[in-house]
Image (tube, helix red, strand yellow):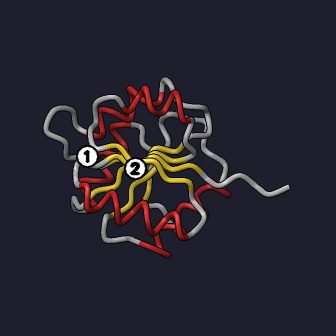
Amino acid sequence: MAEAKPRVLVVDDDPDLLDLVQRSLSAYGFDVQTHTSALGVSNIVRASEPDFVLIDVNFPALKGDKVVGLARQYAPPGTRFILYSASDEAKLRSLAISSGADGYISKSVQGADLAQKLNAMRLKPRPASPNRNPSPVES
């Protein structure tokens, strides 16, 4: 029996980036869903039960780091929330800590590198403590 494809929800207001990430991760065996707004993410997470939520932090109405705490309430326990942004690493690390995200990845990471980082993270157990120290997602 074939193993189910890892499910990824990518949330960003840039449709070109969403298309690029969807095409590249799909090519590496991921089932990718996209959403262009921070609003409604909780409902999508509840309905689709993704393994990963890659979320930008720079939305006009509701910042992505705030969405993490809201959406986590509706996510399965194994769902990993990853801040995915072009912000500098120090800012991303700080936001990941304050939001309870499982990690962060720079938007400069694409294609095979992004797929590899997500696959490596999927194989690691998720820390039980909400006060964990998020780090860049590494392979």
**Residue 138: percent from the left, percent from the top?**
51, 66
Element at label 1:
loop
Say above or below: 123 vs 74: below
What residue appears at the point 34 percent right and 43 percent down from the top-left corner? 35
**Marking on residue 10:** 2
Tell me whether circle 2 and circle 1 mark residues in contact (CB < 8 Å): no
What residue appears at the point 51 percent right and 47 percent down from the top-left corner? 52
**Residue 63: percent from the left, percent from the top?**
22, 37
Residue placed most toward the observer, 70 or 31: 31
**Marking on residue 66:** none
Say above or below: 22 vs 33: below
Q: How many marks?
A: 2
**Marking on residue 57:** 1
Say above or below: 39 vs 133: above
What residue appears at the point 50 percent right and 42 percent down from the top-left corner? 132
Confirm whether residue 102 shows in the render: no
**Residue 6: percent from the left, percent from the top?**
61, 53
**Residue 128: percent from the left, percent from the top?**
61, 36
Determine the residue located farthest toward the bottom in the rendered image: 112
> From the viewer's perspective, is 92 left or right of 74?
left
Q: Nearer the viewer, mark 2 or mark 1?
A: 2
Q: Residues within 10 Å of mark 1 (few under 14, many from 20)?
A: many
Mark closest to the chain's N terminus, 2 or 1: 2
Element at label 2:
strand
